Amino acid sequence: MKKPRTIARRDADRAWDVVVIGAGPAGAVAAHEAARRGAEVLLVDRKSFPRRKVCGGCLNDAAVTALSDIGLSSWLDTLGAPRTQRLELATRGRRLALDLPGMGIAVSRERLDEMLVAAAAEQGASFLPETRALVEGIEKGYRRVRLEQGHEVVEVAARVVILATGLGSRLAAGEETLDTTVERRSRIGLGAAIESSEGDYPPGAIFMNVAHTGYVGVTRLEDGRINVAAALDVERTRREGADGAIGRILDEAGAAPIRDLSSADWQGTPLLTRRTRQLAAERLFVIGDAAGYVEPFTGEGMEWAIRSGLAVAEPAIETVGGWRPELERRWSRIHAHVVTGRQWKCRVLATLLRHPRMIDVSLRILSASPRISNGLVNWMVPRRVRP
């Protein structure tokens, strides 16, 4: 797989058409699409690459299709990622296996994100890792961006800034947060990739294990590790620790135990479910998790990130030609259509997953009726992305 080309900080010190802050799937796809349309694009991330992320070990069929539609099918093939053909639900000792439609895959974020950045660079985007970027004010038709790399600081100018910095994003140099409301009962995310040769979690399936304190998803990655991603109640996790809370959920669900949970390198997220009120300002668009998030289930979070990265390209390129206040309202409408309006299914599922007894009853019904279970899967897992 190709490695992303990087530039030196001194080479970033100029005016850009587009500066994208955050090189996860949303930011990398936005950079790819803006560069493909001829814009001069700077993609910035505070981490070095490749780097781990908590969630996002699964791409559903809609996400894979979207990436293929912009010419990344062969890039995806280089990842060697196993297809996710089956969803196995477990709660209170009851299990149900459901066939998944389409071409979803399980892939590590280290490989996927590095691939997406490399693809954006091949379109002409410049990549600047290990750099903190903070949005500043407007000056002579440009949005100013402060770039900090160690003790070196430079300000660059951009016709438009795309903010894709994830949950808990900061907006400006004064550490002002985005105007975001966090849902009162929101859970936190925890994840780790664990070396395991045991056969309890074979490739090709997503194992979803549900208990009253959260749920734990497990899948086998392209390199043989198992990816463990969980949405957990805050108080239980504080009392028991990551490995204790996750181990208890696996036990209560009747799932196979995972060795070495206590020695895993766990990473966490802020509270997950949240809504950002303002998604745009003059020469600034907010995308990806920074624009709002709902607890995902089988790859929806990555789908939403890719959707927003694709959809922001058009208003961003239009802004390069000149800012109009209507663009702010337009982005809010576009985002509501391609992302927010599609998150209600996960809201329903997140509510249901807080009640394992209801899940237990549902599994009994689904086990007795393949027609209903197939209909549920088709409802849960979209097949294509339509901006």
Image (cartoon, rainbow, N blue to C red):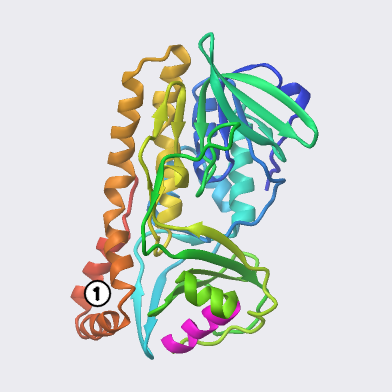
User: Quadrant of residue 137 in the image?
Assistant: top right
The residue under the point 50% across, 49% down is 167
Please determine whether, in this image, residue 364 is positioned above or below residue 64.
Answer: below
Residue 105 seen in the figure: yes
In depth, the one of 13 and 139 nearer the eye is 139
In depth, the one of 19 and 110 nearer the eye is 19
**From this viewpoint, which residue is outermost toward the top?**
140
Amino acid type assigned to the residue bearing label 1 in the image? Ser
* Stretch of the chain drawn in magenta: 243-253
Report the magenta stretch's main SS. Answer: helix
Please determine whether, in this image, residue 226 is positioned above or below residue 148.
Answer: below
Local packing at callout 1 (Cα closer than 10 Å; few below 14, some 14-19, many 20+) is many
The residue under the point 37% across, 89% down is 92
Left or right: where 194 falls relative to 230:
right
Q: Considering the numbered disc 1 on the image, is that residue within a helix, a strand or a loop?
A: helix
> Does the magenta segment cover residue 2?
no
**Residue on which the image places disc 1:** 373
Quadrant where the image shows the C terminus = top left
The residue under the point 28% across, 84% down is 357
Left or right: where 375 falls relative to 262:
left
The residue under the point 72% across, 40% down is 130
In depth, the one of 104 and 147 nearer the eye is 147
User: Quadrant of residue 238 in the image?
Assistant: bottom right
Q: Position of residue 314 (x, y in %)?
A: 40, 26
Q: Position of residue 349 (x, y in %)?
A: 30, 66
Q: Position of residue 86 (x, y in %)?
A: 40, 72
